[in-house]
Image: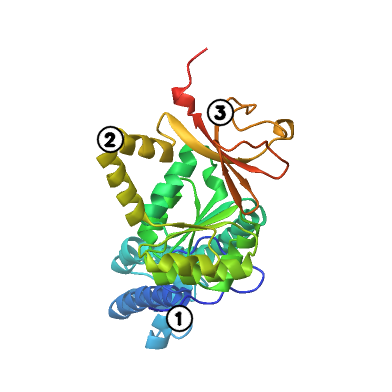
Amino acid sequence: MVRPKRVQPGFHPLRRKVGLPIWADAFIRLALAIGLIALVVAIHWFDRDGLIDHHDGHISLLDVVYFTMISITTTGFGDIAPVSDKARLIEAVIVTPIRIAVLFIFVGAAYDFVIKRGWEKWRMKRIQERLTDHVVVIGFGISGSEAVRELIERGTDPSCIVVLDSSEERLHEAEELGCNVMAADASRDENLMAVRVAEARTVLVSAGRDDSSILIVLTVRHLAPKVPISVVVRAEDNELLARQAGADNVINPVRFTGLLLAGSAQGSHVADYMADLASVGGRVQLVERPVKPEEIGRSLDDLTNGARGLRIYRGEQELGFWEACTLQAGDVIVEIRPTISAQPSK
């Protein structure tokens, strides 16, 4: 696989379209323009009897090339001119459309390589400067795309989500959702720095392969020591490696599926309720939040927002709702609350 080019200092694009390199695009445009000019030269050469040279009265090949270039560029000195009806008809019907096409090629090239690219650089730099407290999603496969859609359903602004993937088809889907996208190798430092990973709220990694995901986690943790990282791994043996690489949350979809299956064996509604908890589209949802100042000294069953507290995270401690304890400053609460759709209308 061809490794992406290094991002130049001073500008890190959030969007790279897959296509021809700049030099190849410019070569094709130039070749097309030269081909059209050569066609006009051939037309003028075969109809040179319809031209007149006011200088020496003789039309040579050099005169034809000269007249073609003057005609194509609409300069028109008048020293060589079409005089026969056939030559004038050729100029009007054939050469003029070719002249317009050549001008469009050069104007289009100037727009693409100067105006458009300059505008895109300015626009992407503005987006990049405003990136803070955003969500970086690495990998927009099945897990990554579902995570992005769930985040949007939960109220996350799509413009605060940055998706990195190597597939243009997947990135197009992310763009349709309103996300910022970048076609890049997420294991490269410069690409993660381009999306300001150190300023992110969280990083979600689902690269499709455990080895790639773990390498990305290592890179992210190196660049962003304090940013929470969640990663998807599919082999149980790799869960410990992912945590050692710096992941805060390791999600094993195979294990979660097993939990749902085991829950369904214990009752027909257990699996449904677990899936309900995991999705904002259900009637209830799990929420993690820091304790509020007014809740300090209270118990888990006496939260100010009316939700049901399930667990307290206090440093390395995990305290359940059945344990007699009061909330303290710095605690993190996991609570269950009804979704907006499930709340009774007033």
Q: Which residue is mark 3?
A: 307
Question: For residue 212, what is the image quadrant?
Answer: bottom left
Q: Is residue 60 visible?
A: no
Front residue (pair 202, 312): 312
Quadrant of image for the N terminus: bottom left
Residue 41 placement (x, y as % from top left): 35, 78
Q: Earlier in the sequence, mark 3 or mark 1?
A: 1
Q: Is residue 229 visible?
A: yes
Q: Dot 2, how many residues are within 10 Å of its Cα: few (below 14), some (14-19), or many (20+)?
A: few
Q: Is residue 214 left or right of residue 329?
A: left
* Residue displayed at 58% across by 61% down: 195
Amino acid tagged 3:
Ala
Counting every numbered tag in the picture gives 3
Mark pair 1, 2: CA separation: 89 Å
Mark pair 3, 1: CA separation: 84 Å
Amino acid tagged 2:
Gly
Q: Which residue is mark 1?
A: 66
* Residue displayed at 55% across by 71% down: 219
Per the image, label 2 sits on a secondary structure element best described as: loop
Marks 1 & 2, CB-CB < 8 Å contact: no
Amino acid tagged 1:
Tyr
Front residue (pair 154, 13): 154
Q: Is residue 296 left or right of residue 83?
A: right
Residue 82 placement (x, y as % from top left): 38, 70
Per the image, label 1 sits on a secondary structure element best described as: helix
* Residue displayed at 72% across by 34% down: 296
Q: Which residue is mark 2?
A: 267
